[in-house]
Image: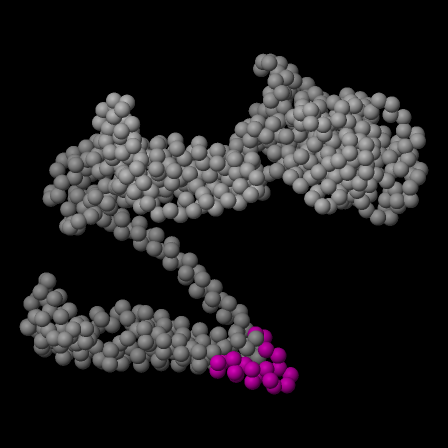
Amino acid sequence: MTFNAAALLLLIAGLALIGWIAGRQRSNLLAGRAGTKLHSRPQYHGWYVALWLFAPAALFLAVWSSVSPGLITNQVLASDAAQSLPAFGFERGAILSDARSVALGQQERVRLPAAAPLVQPYADAAHQYAWIGIAAMLALALAGGLYAFTRIKPDFRARTRVERIVMAFLLLASLVAILTTFGIVLSLLFESIRFFQLVSPMELLFGTNWAPQSGAPVDDTFGGIPLFWGTVLIGAIIAMIVAIPIGMMTAVYLTQYAAPVVRRWVKPILEILAGVPTVVYGYFAALTVAPALREFAVMLGIPNASTESALAAGIVMGVMIIPFVSSMADDSINAVPQAMRDGSLALGATPNETIRQVLIPAALPGVMGGILLAVSRAIGETMIVVMAAGLSANLTANPFASVTTVTAQIVKLLTGDQEFDSAKTLAAFALGLVLFVVTLLLNIAALRIVKKYREAYE
Amino acid sequence: MTQDDLTITDPKMRAQGVDVFYGDKQAINNVSIDVGTDLVTAFIGPSGCGKSTFLRSLNRMNDTVASAKVTGRIELDGEDIYAPSMDVVQLRARVGMVFQKPNPFPKSIYDNVGYGPRIHGLAPSKPDLDVIVERALVRAGLWDEVKDRLLESGTALSGGQQQRLCIARAIAVDPEVILMDEPCSALDPIATAKIEELIHELRGKFAIVIVTHNMQQAARVSQRTAFFHLGTLVEYGKTTDIFTNPKQDRTKDYITGRYG
């Protein structure tokens, strides 16, 4: 007898169904009596019983699944056969896991001879704890179900209770994303702290030489400035020079000039552009745009022209961002009240003057918010720069030269075989933390601007 | 409809047999009316009677509604405003408009008033524009209240001040006609009284057409009143005649509060 969580979950789900039927039946019986009026409709009573049956047992199942392996191991270690185990380290763990695999039927025979005597104690312990777990779970389910069942009365407010429980589930669901974010931040933070114990934060933030080596950290090789500059050059300068004018003009055309039929076609196509996987943009940048730009640069006689250029990555990233900018600008321009447009037109302004002098200034805060969001997306973008921008950390303003970005370096530091205690690997987490903080601040700023602006017209 | 005692010899605007359609729906049916140069003309009538629609066809603001179609003839100084040769931008500079809800631009008070003169090139230099802005604000009765804060946002003013700012904005381009579409419906009684006073003062300098729900307001500010009902012009005449001695039963019923 082993402890199979999935099967047990099915079992209590089945019990819950029985509970649902029983609860509903009982309240129907109560309702059938003369002179009684139920507060809640029968299915709410059914749901009340089912939830009381299911939720505590499922919760116990979740806890037990994570706790019981530890308990089983403890019991095995306490047995006589375990006294001959090596005290600590890799071998002890390997022997235990070998014995566990055989005992749970996951493998035919022991691979390590020392594990053989432990198989039987392991199987016994697993068996014992499985029974304890199942018994406790069933007891909990029955107790919950009975408790709920006995509470069914004509005036019992089952609907209110059920709705409250459902609300709690919804709250739990929304907490998942938030808690995950916290978890990510914490894991980044812990690894970064380990890195900053080896290398000073000042060096990472203000150093100008980036040449991380394996092994013990060498002074002045973890300077992040070339990466930050490359990120800004590609994501915040070149990409925005492409995306802002084109996105704005797209939005102005779509909101002010386009016939409805044009708008109906162009808008979805732009939205499809936003859904193209970035790796596809990466191909386009690396295989089409970058070689063409290099030839162009060579023709102009520009030195250091590389096939991996900041310009190629930036232009393609700008194209990728266009739908973002245009859809935010579109929303903002549409949010400017018709009365503003009418007021300007009624003064004898042309549509063009109205757009330039009234609509765009009025929409500007919203557009700015959209641009900040786009920047934050651009600097966090990885695939395009990995494929098209290169990996050499140059501090240059020449857009035809190869530069690298924070994200591209994170990929470089973490791919291949890594030891997770060297400064080189840990640097990836510190860079990730910097990126996270910067994009977080950009997002907060953008959302605040957008929110403030929305309030102005409501 | 009666027009016997109407003594408008040289109308500023003249509409003849005007129909307005929104898609298939006819909003205005065969309306003919003359608007006098030195007069305030009020359009009254129950909600949905078409008075605002008709007002908006006088400066072709209906052009901004894709489904709207205007037929018939509307003249400004004898010139057909729907003729292909008519430039709608110049038309709207000559026929200004004030809307139901104050709609100042999210710019400074100065720039709100200066907007029209700038786009029409009326002020070659900054001092010229200063003069135009000041004069428009004085005429709109707003100068004393805002002269020390011309660079503050127009949207920070009170509702009544915003509406007078919008009137100043319309005056600043020196139009010949000012159309007012229920200019007081979003204002409190004190702000309303100020706007009405202002209309009195502007009379004679501009031809004014005002749409209003409020019959007392029409009686107070106008010399001519047109009563619209279900898209037709029921009666048009001197305001005193319309309110004391209406010729049509429908007008009488509306004025005495039988419906509306």
Looking at the image, which residue is at 25% across and 26% down?
A: A298
Out of A127 and A193, give the one closest to the viewer: A127
Q: Quadrant of the C terminus of chain A?
A: top right
Residue A434 pos. (x, y %): 29, 41
B259 relative to B148 in the view: left or right = right
Residue B102 pos. (x, y %): 66, 34
Q: Taken as a whole, is the magenta stretch helix, strand or loop?
A: helix
Does A382 sit above or below residue B73?
Answer: below
A232 relative to A418 in the view: left or right = right
Out of A132 and A103, give the one closest to the viewer: A103
> Is B158 covered by the magenta stretch?
no
Magenta-highlighted residues? A21-40
Q: Quadrant of the N terminus of chain A?
A: bottom left
B9 relative to A166 in the view: left or right = right
Q: Quadrant of residue B174?
A: top right
Q: Is residue A448 visible?
A: no
Residue A183 pos. (x, y %): 31, 54
Does A410 sit above or below residue A41?
Answer: above
Residue A313 pos. (x, y %): 31, 36
Does A194 sit above or below residue A362?
Answer: below
Count of marks, rendered view: 0
